[in-house]
Image: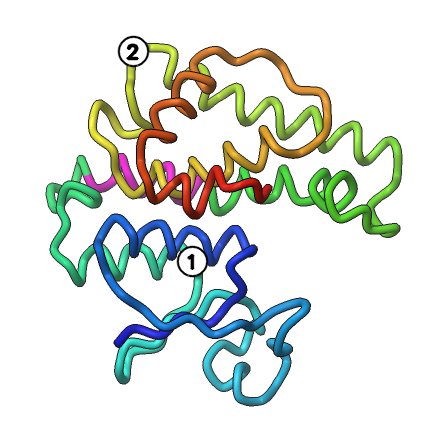
């Protein structure tokens, strides 16, 4: 059986949990991360030298990086509805997944650490204001994209891109700071809430 290492409150672990729910894949999850077993233990570092969750163990296959883990699972199950085989359609999905993992993640980190975690190292007023503006700007790009009548990130069909973006959207909505009114994002969030996996692992009260 699949084994997933990482605490369920981690946004990146929740990507994998939601993906597994969409795939009806059972797994065993072990608690690793802050508040549980340290990811700096040799046992964990032997699996992921970065010391970050999640880590997926599938027999002899060991994978880390949450978006890669999600791609692997979808490919393992042959779910081309979630990650198409055609190069252009697949690229449209992976483009948004890569954007989420790079630009968008870097934008929310300072705000989240300041507003939610209340970490003393993230309380510079100027830096915080700049980070909030950038996070809102990037969410505005997704707003603009969806406002052209698209139901989901890659078109009219739910894909893996919507799992990673949906969790980021939930974090944006749950973080206590000033946000613009983005109607297309609100409608998108409502559509995602129709999926049981999102209610379990995304819009479940955790930012």
Badge 2 local density, few (<14 within 10 Å), some, or many (20+)?
few
Residue 77's mark?
A: none
Q: Which residues are magenta?
A: 90-99
Image quarter (top left, top right, bottom left or bottom right) of the N terminus: bottom left
Asked if residue 28 is among those painted magenta in the image, a careful observer would answer: no
Residue placed at 21% from the left, 23% from the top? Answer: 156
Q: Nearer the viewer, residue 134 or 60?
A: 60
Helix, strand or loop: magenta stretch: helix
Q: Position of residue 32 (x, y in %)?
A: 56, 72
Q: Nearer the viewer, residue 33 or 60?
A: 33
The Cα atoms of the two marked residues, 1 and 2, are separated by 29 Å
Asked if residue 97 is among those painted magenta in the image, a careful observer would answer: yes
Q: Position of residue 77 (x, y in %)?
A: 15, 59
Lower position in the chain sequence, tag 1 or tag 2: 1
In-image side of 80 versus 103 (left or right): left
Above or below, 48 relative to 145: below
Residue receiving disc 1: 66
| Local secondary structure at mark 2 | loop
Above or below, 122 relative to 193: below
Residue placed at 87% from the left, 42% from the top? Answer: 123
Badge 1 local density, few (<14 within 10 Å), some, or many (20+)?
many
Image quarter (top left, top right, bottom left or bottom right) of the C terminus: top right
Q: Position of residue 10 (x, y in %)?
A: 55, 56
Residue 149's mark?
A: 2
Q: Position of residue 76 (x, y in %)?
A: 17, 63
In-image side of 54 versus 86 (left or right): right
Above or below, 116 relative to 148: below
């Amino acid at each position: 059986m699949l084994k997933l290492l990482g605490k369920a409150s981690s946004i990146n672990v929740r990507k994998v949990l939601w993906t597994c729910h969409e795939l009806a894949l059972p797994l065993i999850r072990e608690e690793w991360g802050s508040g549980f077993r340290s990811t700096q233990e040799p046992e964990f570092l032997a699996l992921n030298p970065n010391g970050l969750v999640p880590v997926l163990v599938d027999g002899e296959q060991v994978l880390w990086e949450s978006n890669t883990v999600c791609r692997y699972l979808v490919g393992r199950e042959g779910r081309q509805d979630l990650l198409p085989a055609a190069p252009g359609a697949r690229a449209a999905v992976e483009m948004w997944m890569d954007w989420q993992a790079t630009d968008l993640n870097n934008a929310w980190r300072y705000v989240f650490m300041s507003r939610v975690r209340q970490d003393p190292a993230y309380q510079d007023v100027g830096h915080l204001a700049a980070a909030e503006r950038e996070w809102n700007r990037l969410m505005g790009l997704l707003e603009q994209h969806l406002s052209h009548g698209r139901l989901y990130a890659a078109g009219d069909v739910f894909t893996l891109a919507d799992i990673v973006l949906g969790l980021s959207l939930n974090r944006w909505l749950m973080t206590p700071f000033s946000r613009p009114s983005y109607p297309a994002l609100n409608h998108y969030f409502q559509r995602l809430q129709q999926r049981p996996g999102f209610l379990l692992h995304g819009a479940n009260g955790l930012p």
